[in-house]
Image: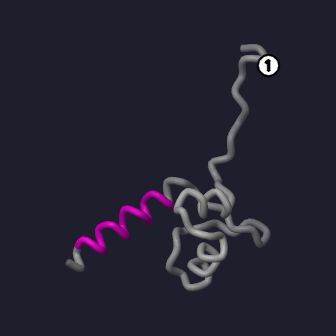
Amino acid sequence: MNEATESPVQSPLLHSRDVATYLKVSESTLSRWRSAGTGPPFIRMSGIARYRIEAVEAWLTALECEHAAER
């Protein structure tokens, strides 16, 4: 493969603004969830929160199951 046809390497980690957009919440809400320990799992790298999309999806799935059990 030559350089023109190679796809760029993408990080498996998402920035908090991307996750907030994905979840349709503000970044401050996501930050509040991090502080309370109620949001999606994250990795702290030099003080910056990063997320794996798989972890965010698993967190959403767990919420869906929890709410279904409450009915």
Q: Residue 31: x percent and y percent?
A: 64, 76
Answer with left or right where residue 45 lies relative to residue 66.
Answer: right
The residue range painted magenta reads 56-68
- Please state if 30 lies on the left or on the right of 64 as rendered: right
Q: How is the image coloured?
A: one colour
| Nearest to the observer: residue 2 or residue 57 | 57
* Magenta highlight on residue 62: yes
Q: Nearer the viewer, residue 71 or 56?
A: 71
Residue 10 x/y as whole percent: 68, 41
Please give the residue where the numbered disc 1 appears in the rendered image.
Answer: 3
* Relative to 12, residue 55 above or below: below
> What is the chief secondary structure element of the magenta stretch?
helix
Q: Quadrant of the C terminus?
A: bottom left
Q: Is residue 14 left or right of residue 64?
A: right
Amino acid type at circle 1 is Glu
- Report x, y in % for residue 68: 24, 71
The residue located at (71%, 14%) in the rendering is 1
Along the viewing direction, whichever of 9 and 38 lies nearer the viewer: 38
